[in-house]
Amino acid sequence: MVCIHGELSRPFEIVNGVRQRDALACLLFTVTLEKVIRDSGINTRATIFNKSVQILAYADDIDIARYESTLRESFLVLEGSAGDAGLTINEGKTKYMF
């Protein structure tokens, strides 16, 4: 469904996705990722220097923890929120830095 001027449309089936390099793909991914981050409940307001668990994001690069001890917990929370939105985190392509 789509909401236009406060009115919901009838449900419709999506039969085609957006190609990965399509200009619209980046916008849709960014909007979806913002919702995932907000729904995760991970702090987005503090700075990385004064909180042990928080999230900083730019495009598809995400910083989710200051300490290794909180990284796994933050990752699992973010992964659950991403799953709720139909996204999966490819751990094979994920890079960790400490």
Image (tube, grey):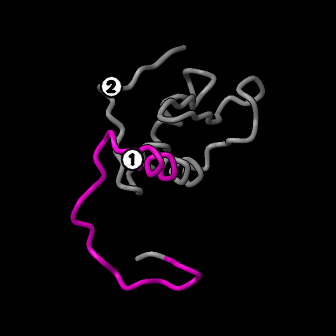
- Residue in the picture at 45% in, 40% down: 76
Assess whether residue 20 is covered by the magenta stretch: yes
Residue 44 image-quadrant placement? top right
Q: Give the Cα distance between marks 1 and 2.
A: 19 Å
**Image vertical order of residue 31 relative to residue 45, above or below:** below
Say which residue appears at 53% left-offset and 36% top-offset.
74
| Residue annotated with mark 2 | 93
Write down the residue under mark 1.
25
Q: Position of residue 12 (x, y in %)?
A: 30, 77
Q: Amino acid at mark 2?
A: Lys
* Disc ID at residue 17: none
- The magenta-colored residue range is 3-32
Query: Picture quarter containing residue 85?
Result: bottom left
Q: Residue at x 23, y 60 (%)?
A: 16
Q: How many marks?
A: 2
Q: Disc 1 residue type?
A: Ala
Name the residue: 31% across, 41% down: 20
Pinpoint residue 75: horizontal percent, then vertical percent. 47, 36
Please give left or right for residue 29 compared with residue 53 in the image.
left
* Residue 11 placement, left or right of 34: left
Quarter occupied by the N terminus: bottom left
Q: Relative to residue 31, is residue 56 depicted above or below?
A: above
Q: Is residue 5 magenta?
A: yes
Q: Residues within 10 Å of mark 1 (few under 14, many from 20)?
A: some
Q: Quadrant of the C terminus?
A: top right
Circle 1 SS class = helix
Q: Is residue 61 above or below residue 35?
A: above
Q: Quadrant of residue 35?
A: bottom right
Q: Position of residue 53 (x, y in %)?
A: 64, 33
Depth check: give the residue in front, 19 or 98.
19
Q: Nearer the viewer, residue 39 or 33?
A: 33
Position in image of residue 4 (x %, y %) = 53, 78
